[in-house]
Amino acid sequence: MINFLNLEYFLMAAEESSITKAARRLNISQQSLSSHIANLEKEFDIALFNRTSPLTLTYAGQMLEKHAREILHLRDETYRELADIKDFSKGRLTIGMSHTRGRRVLPEILPVYREQFPNIELRLREGNTRELDAELLHGDVDLIIGMLPIKGEDIETVPLCEEEILLVVPDVLLEKLYPGQVPQIRARLEDSSDLTLLADCPFLLINTGNRVRTLAEEMFADAQITPPVVLETENIETVLALSIKGMGATFYPKMFMTENDEWRRSLAQTAGLGLYHLNHPKAHGVLGIGYHKGHYMSRATQEFIRIAGEQLQKYSRASLT
């Protein structure tokens, strides 16, 4: 195995073209320097110097001189980078989130995180719940943000804030299903969120694999209904926009509807769009962070979890009023 000290001494001898001068600069004996060079020649089983005066490099020695400088430079760079990581002046963090949740959550977290830790390289992996769970298990992401529980062996979770999934139903659909009875049906939905009333209502749903879609399917099964699904998409904002236009009912996270959000203003200006609380245990949950307890947790990850908790607790209180 190559010894870094042997390389350093070899380079000094090559630079000075003299064992005597190189030993003097290194403050070691000529015998010690000759021993280090002999060890290198034994390691590679080839002569590195022509024993002339002045000392000259063989062809093999010339090749080693070039690569030795590269090796020692890489060693020095590695030590510096590891020291930076240790001091938390440098690092990388890969975050996994759903395609749409990042729009609401990340603006609350990342500006604060970036301000405190500007040298941490941030990467975002987007996908549905199933894809992100797999990436966390395989080590492709450092952490994921999603609804608890996060499935998988050896996964630890940290709760961040409460979350609720709302039922969104345009009045125009209720009028088609129950002509002249919209006020009564709205009252029943507000009182009990009885999904059997919507057995024939068209629904707009996000794709299979997303937790909101899984929740919808479970609630349909519990209500023993199979309503028509007129559109499936990966983007939950699309289903809400189409629902506002009266195309179908849908499900939408309340977290996405803060007072300052453009969708909230749009909804307030849109007559006849009902937002209903769901009387189902899985419609009320907790947003959290999941990480693999068997993988090394960098300080970059630890600090992200801390900041996310601080920021989303405040955000949770604001959004769930």
Image: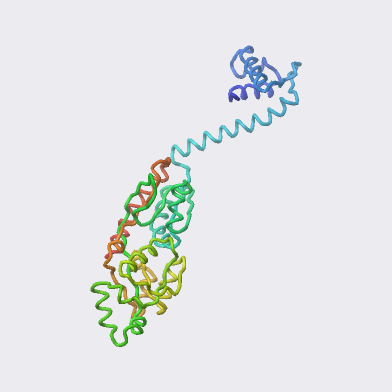
Classify 288 as above or below 319. Answer: above
Quarter-wise, where is residue 3 in the image?
top right
Query: In the image as oriented, which residue stretches furthest toward the front?
Result: 224
Q: Considering depth in this image, is 96 or 265 the residue closer to the camera?
A: 96
Residue 236: horizontal and vertical position, in percent? 42, 67
On the image, the x and y values in percent for residue 67 come to 66, 31
Q: Is residue 277 left or right of residue 138?
A: left
**Image height check: is 21 above or below 70?**
above
Judging depth in this view, the residue of 124 and 146 nearest the camera is 146
| Pick the front one: 311 or 240 | 240
Q: Residue at x 24, y 78 (%)?
A: 187
The image's colouring method is rainbow
In the picture as drawn, the residue positioned furthest to the left comes out as: 191
Residue at x 23% of width, y 73% of height: 191
User: What is the tally of numbered marks visible in this picture?
Assistant: 0
Q: Where, quadrant-wise, is the N terminus in this rendering?
A: top right
Q: Which quadrant: the C terminus?
A: bottom left
Quadrant in the picture for residue 229: bottom left
* Residue 19 placement: quadrant: top right
Q: Find residue 66 and report its horizontal and vertical position in percent.
A: 68, 31
Image point 32% across, 52% down: which residue?
A: 159
Residue 264, x across and y down, in percent = 35, 71
Residue at the location (67% across, 14% down)? 20
Q: Residue furthest bottom?
A: 180
Whether residue 206 sits left or right of residue 54 in the image: it is left
Q: Is residue 149 above or below residue 103?
A: above
